[in-house]
Amino acid sequence: ALDFRGRLRWRYDTGDTVRSSPVLGRAPRGSGEILYVGSANGDLYAISLSFDVFDTHNAIIVNKSASPSGGAAWGPPVEITANNTNGLDKESITADPFDSNYVYATWDRFLSPPGKNASDQGRFHAQSYVEQTWFSRTTDGGATWEPARVIYNPGTHAGTIGNIISVLPDRTLVDGMIVFADHKQTLRGASVAVIRSTDLGVTWSKKAILIAPIDPAFLGAFDPDHPASGEGFISDDQ
């Protein structure tokens, strides 16, 4: 598990001692939404949204722990993207199970004319806004990362969030996401959607395939033994 101080905490199978090690090279005053993944050769990768609470600079940072250390030692942090819009969000990282040299990172970036100090509601009610899907990958086991780039643009007054890449058996990449819009005739409300890449992330489908609309009344998975009770809903820690 990862704590909010950017430390990996784990327990060996042979004992009960909980060990921890520093993982993330955070911005000076904050880090959040930390995720990690193991690659096919046992290397670990951690990704985080790092920020400074006193200004609008934020960054997506990746760290690597080589397999012999088992997460006890981590390499230097690598900023795969950074800006001063305070709009980076919801990063995820996926290791290719068929080639440990390939690891994929994705996130969204929110842009809106009201500027850096606008409230969330102010941004969404602006004359225009967009929240695009961004992507970077390494093809050499984390030695270098490709420049960050947009792989899906839903257009103005629309956005994506919660992007997660999966690798199919034929190594097709599928990026699953939530797509939302508030004015388009063909894209209104929010839906689960996917885009695909058949060349390991070099190019992506331009149009998202809408899988299903999101029902705002659905509150999440629940225990069928307690269907009428609020206590029946399954929390994230179960």
Image (spheres, rainbow, N blue to C red):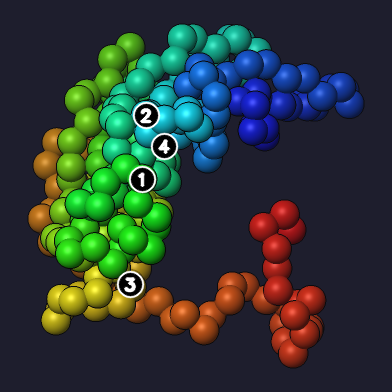
Q: Earlier in the sequence, mark 4 or mark 3?
A: 4
Q: Earlier in the sequence, mark 2 or mark 3?
A: 2
Q: Is residue 212 left or right of residue 155?
A: right
Residue on which disc 4 sits:
93
Residue flagged by tag 4: what amino acid is it? Answer: Ile
Residue 110 position within the rendered picture, expressed as x and y whole percent measured from the top left: 29, 49
Judging depth in this view, the residue of 183 and 3 nearest the camera is: 183
Q: Earlier in the sequence, mark 3 or mark 1?
A: 1
Residue flagged by tag 2: what amino acid is it? Answer: His
Residue on which disc 3 sits:
191
Q: Residue at x 75, y 80 (%)?
A: 230
Q: Residues within 10 Å of mark 4 (few under 14, many from 20)?
A: many
Question: Quick one: SS at disc 4?
Answer: strand
Confirm or deny contact between disc 4 and disc 1 (CB under 8 A): no
Residue flagged by tag 1: what amino acid is it? Answer: Asn
Which residue in the rendered view is the most extreme toward the right?
16
Residue flagged by tag 3: what amino acid is it? Answer: Ser
Q: Residue at x 58, y 19 (%)?
A: 23
Q: Tell us which disc is closer to us: 2 or 3.
A: 2
Confirm or deny contact between disc 4 and disc 3 (CB under 8 A): no
Residue on which disc 2 sits:
57
**Can you say which quadrant of the picture contains the N terminus?**
top right
